Every structure is written in C-alpha cells, then in structure tokens.
Amino acid sequence: MSVICPLCQHQASVFYQFKKRLYHQCQFCYGIFMDPALWPDREAEQRRYLEHLNDVEDSRFQRFVAPITELVQQLFQPHQLGLDFGAGHAPVITHVLQQSGFAIAAYDPLFFNDNALLEQRYDYICSCEVIEHFHHPAQSFSQLRNLLKPGGRLFCMTEIYHEGIDFHRWNYKNDPTHVFMYHRNTISYIADKYGFKQAGIEGRLIQFQANSSL
C-alpha cells in the first residue's frame, strides 16, 4: 500500500524496516518519514521533551544553539523582531538573545502556547531541533513563511540525511518524536514551494530567506 508524503503529497516507498520501526522515503522531495501509524501522540511527545534536562544557563546548551544565535547577532539589530518557534520548555535561544538586548519571544505549542505571537510578523524566526518533529510539515512551513516579513530569515537546525549515512546506525532516527527527516533535495523543495528565494545548508544549520513579497 502506497503512503503519501506529508510534505509534498507525492507517493513514498518503504525505505527502512526493522522490528517495529518503519520509514518511508518520498520519491519527489526525498523526505524520510516514520510511518504515520507510529507517530507519538501529544502526551507522549510532551513526556519525551521533558526528559531533556535542559537549562538555559548551561554553557553547553548555549554552545549548541550558537550557530543560530551568533548569526542572528551578525545579521540583525536588537530592535528587530524575532520568534523562537518550537522553543521547548527551556527556551535557550530566547534567553541568549534577550540577554544581548534582542527583541525575541518564545513560542511552543506545548510549553509557551501564546497564540497572539502567531498574529504578528517577524524579521527572523529561529527553529532549533524543531522541524524533525513536524507531523504536518506542509502546514508548518507555510505557517513559518507567513510569519516572516518580506525578506525575513528562517534559521533551522536539524541533522540532514545523505546517502553516505547508514540509516540503520543513524542515531538521529531513534528518537520516537523525530517523525520527518530531511535530505538536501527536501530543503530545495521547501524553498521553492513556500516562497523562499534561497536556502543555504552548513552542517546542521539551514538558512531560508523569504522572498520580498508573499
């Protein structure tokens, strides 16, 4: 039975199966996703996230998000509006940037669910270790694009899959909340589909820049 890719709505085929784990790869955008029947529910996701004992004051945690926070400080002025989308229960990006005087707010559907933040538009959005959790990536990337001002930037961090990776040994897939994983071609598809004029990948860091108009 064919499965439809939740990002681009094209057909996907079985990519990896081991014991009770099943993943599909889209033949169009190259995204890899866990079989939807295995996705965790909201309560299971929240329990898993709370297992991460993150502390915004932890220097190791701050170093982990530094590729984003340092780039924001290079490209933007403190008065420009930023959103830490999917900030989790310990919004370290928000903490670091606010400590430097930046106007950024934390949003998370489980921990900082202030929907008023979704009614504004932003100069930049940070989404660190978030996009692999998207159950509905098409809707989520459309939402993120619409939250950006013309020319605004979206900074994401995730592990990018490539053919040199042994998927069986790839630890990144083993987190039960990592339901959708990205190939370089997936990133190109997202840029073209959702109105980003460019997308750059450097290690785990992905930069999208919105077109000058919607």
Image (tube, helix red, strand yellow):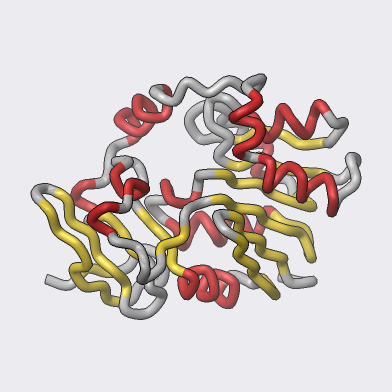
* Quarter of the picture holding the C terminus: bottom right
Q: Residue at x 82, y 36 (%)?
A: 103
Toward the viewer: 164 or 104?
164
Q: Residue at x 37, y 56 (%)?
A: 180
Q: Position of residue 118 (x, y in %)?
A: 65, 43
Q: Residue at x 50, y 45 (%)?
A: 130
Toward the viewer: 148 or 66?
66
Q: Position of residue 15 (x, y in %)?
A: 22, 67
Residue sitting farthest toward the left? 19
| Residue 90 as seen in the image, left or right of residue 99 | left
Q: Residue at x 87, y 31 (%)?
A: 101
In the displayed structure, 12 sits above or below 161; it is below
Q: Position of residue 11 (x, y in %)?
A: 27, 76
In the displayed structure, 15 sits above or below 129; it is below
In the displayed structure, 160 sits above or below 20; it is below
Q: Position of residue 41 (x, y in %)?
A: 29, 37
Examine the image and state in which quarter residue 5 appears.
Answer: bottom left
Toward the viewer: 113 or 78?
78
* Quarter of the picture holding the N terminus: bottom left
- Count of labels shown? 0
